[in-house]
Amino acid sequence: MKRLVTDYLDESAEKFPEKIAFTDEKREITFKELKNEATSIATFLANKQIFKNPIVIYLDKSVEVIASFLGAAYSGNFYTPIDTAMPASRIEKIMETVNPALIITDQKHLEACKTFSSTIPVELYEKLIKIPADKKLIQKALDRTIDTDILYVLFTSGSTGTPKGVIINQKAVIDYAEWVTETFNITSETVFGQQAPFYFDNSILDIYQTLKNGASCHIIPQKFFMLPKNLFTFLAEKKVNTIFWVPSALCIMANLKAVDKFPVPTLEKILFCGEVMPNKQLNIWRKTYPNALYANLYGPTEITDVCAYYIVDREFSDDESLPIGYPCKNTDILVLDDENKLVLPENEGKKGELCVRGTCNSMGYYKNPEKTAAAFVQNPLNNSYHEIIYRTGDIVHYNSRGEIMYDCRKDFQIKHMGHRIELGEIETAVSAVEGVKQNCCLYDTEKSKIVLFYTGSIEAQEIVEAIKNSVPDYMIPNKKVHLEEMPMNMNGKIDRTELKKQL
């Protein structure tokens, strides 16, 4: 039976019409209001006979963005969010690739929008939501939509500097949403404190869990992540019980000693994804909220946010790595060695590339057949029929418990002094050192040097002394760079591209 993401809003709007669905700094919106605004937008698109086309959303992070996403979905189209803080050059590259049928913006951003939309129609959100919804017209569009149609295209960084548009269909998001609800017991009582930008795939969990379960989602103002007291006061006032943040956000709060200073009595589920979560900072959270559920979720944008997970079930020392655990339901993970042979859980410690097959997989990169063909390939273990797997480029191994352990990116594996080294192993060791807040290792290929960038109150030589028992001599960084602040990209992760400029 066909299921579309709009079914989630239909059901929640019927069951909880007056309940607050989403809030931002300026307004709150009920499920009924959200459906009304989304279907008004959909009616405009359907009347214009725009169908199965990209719709760009150019708005500040707000409830209006979510209504616009759903307006695109109700009309049988798909959406691409563009953050108003994105650099102009990146916006131009995305627009060139996606070439949308329409841009939805508001009066505040109309002038800025004109700088990159000379040939593309632009409509104001304020105008669109005043259009009376035409249920018959919308139903006609939905009848023509199937669950393998595109829901969104999110743009990730490309190695050549050109953003890649990851295509995700409705079925993949529904499959993911069903798994999250079941695994983490998300209900109408769940209250999310939402951190991820809407152009970042982590936001998919917050948005679609809220819609599916009639939960509540409070969009946290970005500035609060620089103001710990305001952030935790916000979480406490909104009675937030579930957060899904990037590890950097959790680490910053731990490093600022804010976690135990400003308690949030309702907090019971702490999920994280997007980069490695150091146990040193996680242990600070665990000490403050010992009864909370902690889960390490893993997955790139190309597999609909998450393909593996680990619910923290034991104690870890500060210098240990956290597992990424096991495949999600209805997802198969293949660990393939350099000869494309399967690495099994019983091959403890043997490294290979993590590859994924299942409904979760992206349909490829928008208008980029070359990159698609390189990452989405025929399963080398199957020579009987056409079966595509996604090669993540991440190197992993199984531990003695059969859990998957993340090692590093394939391109973070280096050859130094005759040794094959994973920079992530050095970063894990440095993360455990008292006085280090954040760190990142890069390799200067021209000078054949391992370079450590770090923030914190410790001297470089003290770090070297502290990690001598954790890593061999040939893995000790040759150059140490102390930073006042670690550069972060728009997704809240450490900006390695910016750091490379300092090599």
Image (cartoon, rainbow, N blue to C red):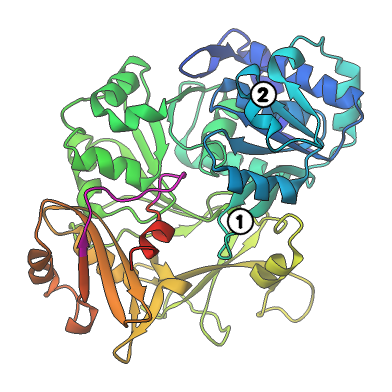
The disc at residue 238 is none
Is 43 left or right of 164, judged from the image as shown? right
Spatial CA span between label 1 and label 2:
32 Å
Tally the numbered discs: 2
Q: Secondary structure at mark 1?
A: helix
Of callouts 1 and 2, which one flags the residue occurring earlier in the amino acid sequence?
A: 2
Q: Which residue is nearer to you in this view: 94 or 112?
A: 112
Q: Where is the N terminus found, in terms of image quarters?
A: top right
Q: Is residue 486 highlighted in magenta?
A: yes
Q: Nearer the viewer, mark 1 or mark 2?
A: 2
Q: Which residue is nearer to you in this view: 66 or 378?
A: 66
Q: Does the residue at mark 1 contact the one at mark 2 (Cβ under 8 Å)?
A: no
Residue at image mark 2: 110
Badge 1: residue crowd in 10 Å (few <14, some 14–19, many ≥20) = many
Q: Where is the C terminus found, in terms of image quarters?
A: bottom left
- Identify the magenta region: 481-493
Instruction: Estimate the x, y position of residue 234 in percent, counting from the top left.
Output: 33, 20
Badge 2: residue crowd in 10 Å (few <14, some 14–19, many ≥20) = some
Residue 252 placement: quadrant: top left
Q: Quick check: can you spot residue 388?
A: no
Instruction: Estimate the x, y position of residue 42 in percent, counting from the top left.
Output: 80, 23
Residue farthest to the bottom, as pictured: 418
Q: Main secondary structure of the magenta part?
A: loop
Q: Residue at position x 38%, y 80% from top?
A: 445
Whether residue 61 is situated above or below residue 474 in the rendered picture:
above
Residue 481 placement: quadrant: bottom left
Q: Residue at position x 72%, y 19% from top?
A: 124
Whether residue 3 is situated above or below residue 374 in the rendered picture:
above
Residue at image mark 1: 302
